[in-house]
Image (cartoon, rainbow, N blue to C red):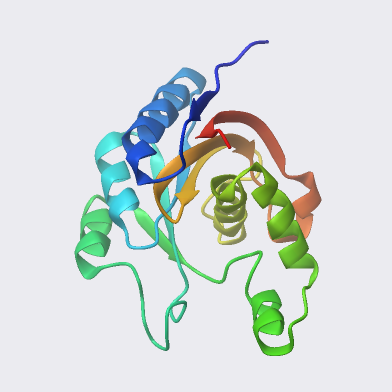
Amino acid sequence: MEAKIVYFPEPGPQNTEEVLRIANNRAKELGIKTIVVASTRGQTGARATEVFSGIKLVVVSQITGFEGPNTQQMTPENRKKIESKGETILTTAHIFGGLAASMRIKFGMYLFEEVVSNTLRLFGQGTKVACEVAIMAADAGLARTDEDIIAIAGTNQGADTALLLRPVTSREFFDLKIKEILCKPHF
């Protein structure tokens, strides 16, 4: 079996349109039913609603309070656009963060979740986040664990990584299967 991987010269939001195009084409080829997209401020999620049709879209946002107490980074305009298209926004604790990040911040301790997170970052920030949002969506019952999905994420802003994977819930983390790297930055 052969598959094409697109490598971008640099990470970042300038790759977003191409990532969405690549993911949409592969989703159509494989009959993918669910796309999970990381979107902090909602721009990538809002744009994804325009690209993907006939495919369930789950937009995963940052937790409230990530940048400061009671602060939600997704803008009301982007939230409205995503929801007006009938798509789902999932806002929940990061599977590789949460309490582990709290322990690091408060006590300077690195726990298992952060070791996993940093290990996945060896393949790029987008790879780590794509795996993370896929698990978060599975934990919420928004992505099936018996079907392949495409997970899209990026480095800081926009999208620069897309993976074809079989998601799992956090309890089954070590059964996560990354089947294809559709695109990612070339570091």
Dividing the picture into quarters, in which one does residue 171 lie? Answer: bottom right
**Number of marks in the image?**
0
Q: Is residue 6 visible?
A: yes
Camera sees residue 147: no
Residue at (64, 11) in percent of width and height: 2
Query: In the rendered image of this protein, does residue 72 appear above or below residue 20?
Result: below
Q: Nearer the viewer, residue 141 or 45?
A: 45
Q: Is residue 154 left or right of residue 187?
A: left
Residue 51 placement (x, y as % from top left): 29, 35
- Residue 84 appears in which quarter of the rendering? bottom left
Horizontal and vertical percent position of residue 36: 47, 47
Q: Residue 147 placed where, x, y %? A: 61, 36
Q: Relative to 143, does residue 64 appear above or below in the rendering?
A: below
Q: Residue at x 51, y 21 (%)?
A: 30
Outermost top residue = 1
Q: Is residue 55 left or right of residue 107?
A: left
Residue lying at 42% horizontally and 89% vertically, measured from the top left: 69
144 or 69: nearer the viewer: 69
Residue 128 image point, x, y percent: 62, 51
Up/down of 12 relative to 156, above or below: above
Q: Taking 87 as reference, is 50 above or below it?
A: above
Name the image quarter holding residue 149: top right
In what quadrant of the picture does the N terminus appear?
top right
